């Protein structure tokens, strides 16, 4: 039997709401193991939208780079994270850096690790649209992170196949499921109640979000005006729209939906509220990535207001429908889902393709196995 080499020091870096929701289950699993020392570093790319998630999952950050500024640019985030990461890596000397997904925090943290020759391991690796402006800049970010990663935690076989096609070594790719499903196991409860659910009680509830950078402007105006116009035709629907804190998003939402009395525009919801309200909703409309993974697990049809998706599994399973960002296409898709019972049933009953809620365990086990073999740490 091989003897354990030593304690493995892992620096986990993330900065936005969805990364926090999907990395907290991994951190909780890492912390179970005495053979691992876990250092949690948040970039602070998000602030108000990030901190409550750490509280919910009872995780405290060892470092907070605190980079967020109002209306921050990609330049701001990239340079601040890159420079601040250097000092933290110098201080901690981790054996690996673990990043998630496709944000600019993940990209800049991975780049800094690469510059300092620390192996990067990528959670939610291999998602692709192969259109570098959609989503923007996420498609570039995830390809760039994968270009320098040592180990790849692919949520699905399709993601693994993308990585293999790009020439990544098969033995370094682990299909784990998506850690978003692990998070749902922690947040969703049958006993959950909320005043918003009482407000929507007798109606069909649509949960609505949008925030993507490439949709700011006319596409986002199309989304919210399509919802407003369709609502006029269906008196039994109510809409909950938790507004992203980006001021440019909020301006459009308020302008298009602010005067509707069957619409609640709220602050970003706590993750427990959001997941449970999604579970009680009739359908979801969004341009979000993470919501495309959660909704299939909760049996909720999703109209994806984008032209591309890196989550084709949900489309193939039947839960997600890609409807573009034109006003007419959005209105048509809404009307169809609100009137065609058979279509609704088919979308609601399809099978969740994103895993069994044990992704974090698989990720941590793979890290331990590789640490024991010491075969990704030779640079
Ligand atoms: C970021 C990610 C995106 C991810 C999204 C999740 C990049 C380039 N974008 O986009 O991939 O889908 O997070 O939500 O990495 N703001 C606050 N408080 C907060 C968070 C944001 O006030 O807690 C405001 C600030 O004005 C900030 C703006 O929102 O400048 C935009 O935030 P930013 O992280 O740049 O973009 P997101 O659209 O959130
Ligand atoms: N979410 C939340 N509160 C909200 C809106 C979304 O907790 O008010 C959660 C949602 O359940 C999902 C994640 O935030 O886990 C998605 O974040 P977002 O849409 O901002 O980013 P993306 O997934 O598109 O990168």
Image (tube, rainbow, N blue to C red):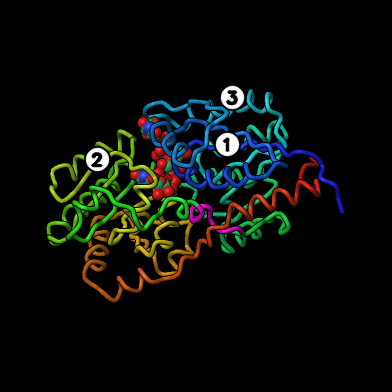
Image-based side of 203 in relation to 52, left or right: left
Q: CB of mark 3 within 8 Å of CB of mark 2?
A: no
* Front one among 264 and 137: 264
Residue most extreme to the right: 1
Q: Height in image: 190 above or below 6?
A: below
Mark 3 near mark 1, Cβ–Cβ under 8 Å? no
Q: Quadrant of residue 280?
A: bottom left
Q: Position of residue 142 (x, y in %)?
A: 55, 46
Number of marks: 3
Residue 220 lies within the magenta run: no
Report the residue marked by disc 2.
Answer: 252
The residue that label 3 is drawn on is 83
Magenta span of residues: 176-182
Q: Earlier in the sequence, mark 3 or mark 2?
A: 3
Q: Are marks 2 and 1 in contact (CB under 8 Å)?
A: no
Residue matched to label 1: 13
Distance between the alpha carbons at the discs numbered 2 and 1: 32 Å
On the image, the x and y values in percent for residue 356 come to: 53, 62
Can residue 111 be seen in this snapshot?
yes
């Amino acid at each position: 039997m091989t003897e354990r080499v030593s304690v493995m020091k892992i620096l986990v870096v993330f900065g936005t709401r969805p990364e926090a929701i999907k990395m907290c289950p991994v951190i909780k699993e890492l912390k179970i193991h005495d053979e691992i020392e876990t250092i949690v570093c948040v970039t602070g790319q998000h602030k108000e939208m990030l901190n409550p998630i750490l509280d919910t999952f009872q995780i405290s950050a060892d470092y907070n780079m605190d980079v967020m500024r109002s209306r921050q640019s990609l330049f701001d985030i990239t340079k601040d994270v890159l420079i601040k990461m250097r000092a933290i890596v110098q201080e901690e000397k981790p054996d690996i850096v673990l990043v998630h997904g496709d944000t600019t925090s993940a990209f800049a943290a991975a780049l800094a690790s690469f510059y300092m020759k620390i192996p990067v391991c990528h959670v939610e690796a291999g998602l692709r649209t192969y259109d570098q402006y959609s989503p923007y800049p996420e498609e570039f970010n995830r390809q760039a992170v994968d270009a320098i990663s040592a180990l790849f935690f692919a949520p699905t076989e399709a993601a693994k196949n993308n990585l293999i096609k790009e020439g990544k070594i098969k033995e370094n790719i682990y299909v784990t499921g998506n850690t978003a499903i692990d998070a749902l196991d922690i947040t969703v409860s049958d006993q959950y109640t909320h005043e918003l659910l009482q407000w929507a009680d007798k109606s069909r509830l649509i949960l609505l979000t949008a925030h993507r950078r490439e949709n700011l402007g006319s596409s986002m105006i199309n989304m919210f005006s399509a919802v407003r116009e369709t609502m006029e035709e269906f008196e039994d629907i109510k809409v909950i729209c938790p507004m992203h804190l980006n001021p440019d998003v909020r301006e459009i939402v308020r302008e298009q939906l602010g005067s509707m009395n069957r619409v609640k525009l709220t602050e970003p919801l706590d993750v427990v509220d959001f997941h449970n309200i999604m579970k009680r909703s009739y359908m979801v409309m969004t341009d979000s990535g993470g919501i495309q993974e959660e909704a299939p697990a909760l049996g909720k049809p999703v109209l994806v207001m984008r032209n591309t998706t890196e989550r084709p599994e949900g489309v193939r399973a039947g839960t997600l429908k890609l409807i573009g960002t034109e006003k007419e296409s959005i209105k048509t898709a809404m009307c169809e889902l609100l009137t065609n019972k058979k279509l609704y049933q088919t979308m609601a009953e399809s099978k969740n393709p994103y895993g069994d809620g044990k992704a974090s365990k698989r990720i941590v086990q793979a890290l331990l196995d590789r640490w024991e073999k010491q075969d990704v740490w030779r640079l």
